[in-house]
Image (spheres, helix red, strand yellow):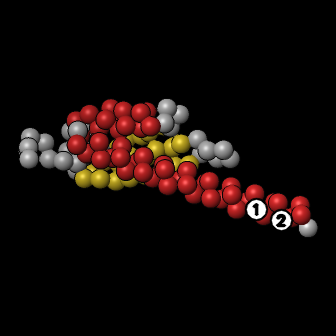
Amino acid sequence: MFTALTVVVGLVVAGIVTVASYLAAVDLARDAARAAALDPGNATGAASSVVSSVDADAQVSVNGGGGAGTDLITVQVTRPGHLFDLSATAVIVAEPAGESQ
C-alpha cells in the first residue's frame, strides 16, 4: 500500500514539474517572439539573445522576419527536460519598418 501511494505522489509531483517547465517554455517563446518582432531585420539574433540570456541549453528557431516581406514571425523554443524535451511556439506580427512611435 505504501509503495503504491509513493508512486502516485511521485507521478503527481513529476506532472506538476513538467507543466511548470512547459509554461516557462511558453513564456520564453513569447518573449523571444516579441524581441524578434521589434527587430524583424535581425529576428533570429534578437530571439536567440533573449533565449540564451534565460536558458543557455535552450534552442530557438525563427521563421519569417529578415525583411523577407512576410509580416508573421514564428519562434519555436525547445528546452531540455528531465524526461523529454519541451517545445513551445509563438507567432507574432512584425513591427512595420521605418515607423517610430
Task: Please report the residue visible at 43 percent of the width from the left and 33 percent of the height from the top.
Answer: 52
Q: Which mark is residue 5?
A: 2
Judging depth in this view, the residue of 72 and 88 nearest the camera is 88
**Furthest residue to the bottom?**
1
Asked whether residue 48 appears in the rendered view, the answer is no
How many numbered discs, if any?
2
Task: Please report the residue visible at 49 percent of the width from the left and 55 percent of the height from the top.
Answer: 23
Kindly identify the amino acid type of the residue bearing the numbered disc 2. Leu
C-alpha separation, residue under disc 1 versus residue under disc 2: 6 Å
| Tag 1 and tag 2, C-beta contact below 8 Å | yes
- Rendered location of residue 13, percent (x, y): 69, 57
* Relative horizontal placement of residue 37, taking residue 74 as reference (left or right): left
Note whether 10 is above or below 94 in the view shown: below
What kind of element bears circle 1? helix
What kind of element bears circle 2? helix
The residue carrying pointer 1 sits among few (fewer than 14), some (14 to 19) or many (20 or more) residues within 10 Å by Cα, namely few
* Relative horizontal placement of residue 37, taking residue 86 as reference (left or right): left
Judging depth in this view, the residue of 55 and 70 nearest the camera is 55
- Rendered location of residue 44, percent (x, y): 33, 35
Asked whether residue 42 appears in the rendered view, the answer is yes
Q: Which residue is mark 1?
A: 9
